[in-house]
Image (cartoon, rainbow, N blue to C red):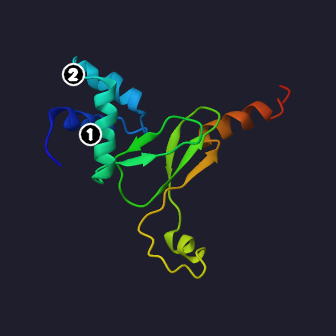
């Protein structure tokens, strides 16, 4: 992969925005440093960085893809309430055990879990808790 100033800027934004940013979020931050940057250039560079194995694409069903600078094998939780994407660590040995009689060699796994993040679960529990009368 040839070096380009725009690609390096996109990579820096993915690393700086550690909350699994969308291409649009990366663009909004990067264009401040490079006013001539286009959204199309951001998309092309994100695709190149994914293909080169420098970042990971995090697919979210029905939503814009997110991008992650963490390359080790891990999964993600998409909070259907607040939209946050967070890392989820799965037991790789157990996951491999789920593959019965698999003849292929598995090199990576991309899994996105849909649910509620701990903050949204806590907020819902707080709302549902009965109010104790004051004495």
What SS does tag 1 mark?
helix
Q: Which residue lies at the image location 40% right of the left edge and 42% below the top edge?
A: 67
Q: Which residue is mark 1?
A: 11
* Nearest to the observer: residue 85 or residue 3: 3
Q: Position of residue 104 (x, y in %)?
A: 47, 76
- Residue 16 visible from this viewpoint: no
- In percent of width and height, residue 10 lies at 27, 35
Q: Which mark is residue 129?
A: none
* Label 1 environment density (alpha carbons within 10 Å; few <14, some 14–19, many ≥20): many
Q: Residue at x 54, y 55 (%)?
A: 111
Q: Please, is residue 33 above or below residue 20 in the view? A: above
Position of 51 with respect to 127 (left or right) is left
Q: Quadrant of residue 7?
A: top left
The residue sitting at 51% across, 74% down in the picture is: 93
* For residue 33, side relative to residue 85 (left or right): left
Q: Is residue 50 visible?
A: yes
> Tags 2 and 1 in contact by the CB under 8 Å rule?
no
Quick check: 134 left or right of 28? right
Given residues 48 and 97, the one toward you in this image is: 48
Residue 115: x, y in percent?
A: 65, 44
Residue in the foreground of this view, choosing between 38 and 130: 38
The Cα–Cα distance between marks 2 and 1, rounded to whole angstroms, is 13 Å
Compared to 91, does 79 lie above or below?
above
Give the mark, 2 or 1, whose residue is nearer the N terminus: 1
Residue at horizontal 41%, vertical 68%? 107
Q: Residues within 10 Å of mark 2 (few under 14, many from 20)?
A: few
Residue 98 vs 27, above or below: the answer is below
Q: Quadrant of the C terminus?
A: top right
Q: Secondary structure at mark 2?
A: helix
Q: Which mark is residue 33?
A: 2
């Amino acid at each position: 992969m040839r070096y380009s100033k725009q690609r390096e800027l996109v990579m820096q934004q993915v690393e700086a925005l550690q909350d699994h940013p969308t291409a649009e979020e990366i663009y909004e931050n990067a264009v401040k440093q490079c006013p001539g940057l286009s959204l199309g250039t951001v998309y092309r560079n994100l695709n190149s960085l994914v293909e080169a194995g420098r970042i990971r694409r995090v697919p979210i069903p029905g939503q814009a893809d997110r991008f992650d600078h963490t390359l080790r094998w891990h999964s993600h939780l998409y909070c259907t309430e607040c939209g946050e994407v967070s890392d989820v660590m799965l037991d790789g040995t157990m996951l491999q055990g789920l593959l019965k009689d698999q003849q292929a060699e598995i090199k990576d796994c991309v899994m996105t879990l849909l649910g509620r993040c701990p903050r949204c679960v806590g907020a819902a529990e707080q709302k549902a808790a009965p109010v104790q009368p004051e004495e």
